[in-house]
Image (cartoon, rainbow, N blue to C red):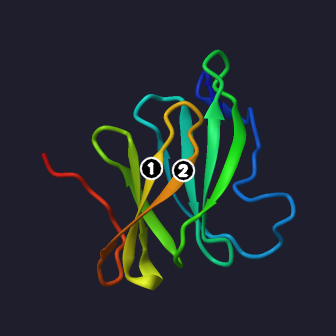
Amino acid sequence: MSCNEGHLQQIQDISSVPDSFHGFAGSADIHVSPDGKFVYGSNRGESNTIVIYAVNPATGMLTVKGFEPVLGKAPRNFNFDPSGNFLLVANQDTDEVVIFKRNKQTGLLKDTGERIKAGNPVCVKWIN
């Protein structure tokens, strides 16, 4: 959406799931990477993925880079660690936070194999 004299105008419509997906996604959370180069969104329901978009720095338009399975169910909130190197996903229905390594060049995620057990996690926050 863009704002012009108090009026919003849609500038892009982009899916958070692959074209081949036909189930319920139930998107829950969205964050811009600390470097501003990528946007990430969580999909719950039958999808259980994080969508990764690249941001065009000149136009702000998004391009789908990929879809990463969250290795659990019902990804509610997720957040970047302070360095921006990792993305932690709170999978509410599988009682754990999954830790992904983030490639700062491509925006893509890779499972580290590390988990934090937590009963019904719904939020990831960093305390300084």
The residue under the point 56% across, 53% down is 41
Q: Position of residue 122 (x, y in %)?
A: 37, 71
The quadrant holding residue 65 is top right
Which amino acid lies under the numbered mark 1 shown in the image of this protein? Lys
Indicate whether 29 appears above or below 14.
below
Gap between marks 2 and 1 measured at Cα:
6 Å
Looking at numbered disc 2 in the image, what kind of residue is underneath it? Leu
- Marks 2 and 1 in Cβ contact (< 8 Å): yes
Given the current orientation, which residue lies at the most extreme top position? 58
* Residue count near mark 2 (Cα–Cα under 10 Å), binned few <14, some 14–19, many ≥20: many
Q: Mark 1: which secondary structure?
A: strand
Q: Which residue is mark 2?
A: 109
Q: Position of residue 75 (x, y in %)?
A: 50, 70
Q: Nearer the viewer, residue 123 or 111?
A: 111
Query: Which residue shows up at 22% across the image and 52% down it?
Result: 126
Comparing 128 with 117, the one in front is 117
Q: The C terminus appears in which quarter of the rendering?
A: top left
Judge from the rendering whether residue 41 lies leftward or rightward of residue 63; answer left or right: left
Q: Which residue is mark 1?
A: 101
Q: Residue at x 51, y 39 (%)?
A: 103
Q: Which element carries disc 2, helix, strand or loop? A: strand
On screen, residue 102 above or below 94: above
